[in-house]
Amino acid sequence: LDLGNLLAYSPGAVDPAAFRADPEAACRELCRGATQALFAKVFQLPTSAAPIGRLARLPEPTTEVPRFKKAPAVNRARTKWEQFAQERGITKKKRSKIVYDEMAGDWKRRHGYGKANDVQDLAIIEAKAGEDAGTDPFAAARKEKKKRVEAQSQRRGGEPPPRGGGE
């Protein structure tokens, strides 16, 4: 028994005749015995009162349990990016998926369907000084977006835009 890991095992040999006759029943019997022995030892440990009930203080583990992944290196050398980021005070920040849309006065997605501050949602676009009066600002916005999507596609290696991208 290893109370620190709450681990119970039976070092004894398995009865081959009982295992051949009914393997499930034989395993269940071994598990029942090991579990009963483990809980008998746990209930003998010193306890303390807590708001959720009684807590038993477990001793240090005696069995070393293998890790799925190797333990991280404690004093590994920093990468060049990590050194640069530390010198400049750069920290990794996760951007929020929603932003405040001033036009709608509501929180909307940053990208995709129903995104915030979308030019296509505007009913009126003010003309800028020096623009032709006959140009369609909505068509110009669509053309600009198409150019941005195409440029991004070229940077990605000529792949088509991901589903629904472009127009």
Image (cartoon, rainbow, N blue to C red):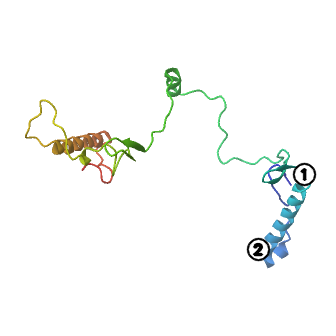
Relative height, residue 62 to residue 38 (above, below) = above
* Image-based side of 78 in relation to 150, left or right: right
> Would you name the residue on which mark 1 appears?
45
Q: Amino acid at mark 1?
A: Leu
Residue situated furthest right in the rendering? 44
| 33 up-or-down from 74: above or below | below
Judging from the image, what secondary structure is the residue with disc 1 in? loop
Residue 42: quarter of image: bottom right
Tell me: 22 left or right of 148: right
The extreme top residue here reads: 87
The mark that comes first in sequence, 1 or 2, is 2
Q: Check disc 2 and report the residue beneath it.
A: 24
Count residues near mark 1 (Cα–Cα under 10 Å), then give few for <14, some for 14-19, many for 20+: few
* Amino acid found under the numbered disc labelled 2: Glu
Say which residue appears at 34% left-offset and 41% top-offset: 102
Q: What is the quadrant of residue 9 in the picture?
A: bottom right
- Left or right: 99 as drawn, with respect to 146: right
**Badge count:** 2
Residue 163: name its quadrant.
Answer: bottom left
The image quadrant where one finds the N terminus is bottom right
Given the current orientation, which residue lies at the most extreme front position?
105
- Residue 153 image position (x, y, % from top left): 29, 43
Looking at this view, is 142 or 48 the one in front? 48
- The image position of residue 17, as x and y in percent, is 84, 75
On the image, the x and y values in percent for residue 105 come to: 36, 44
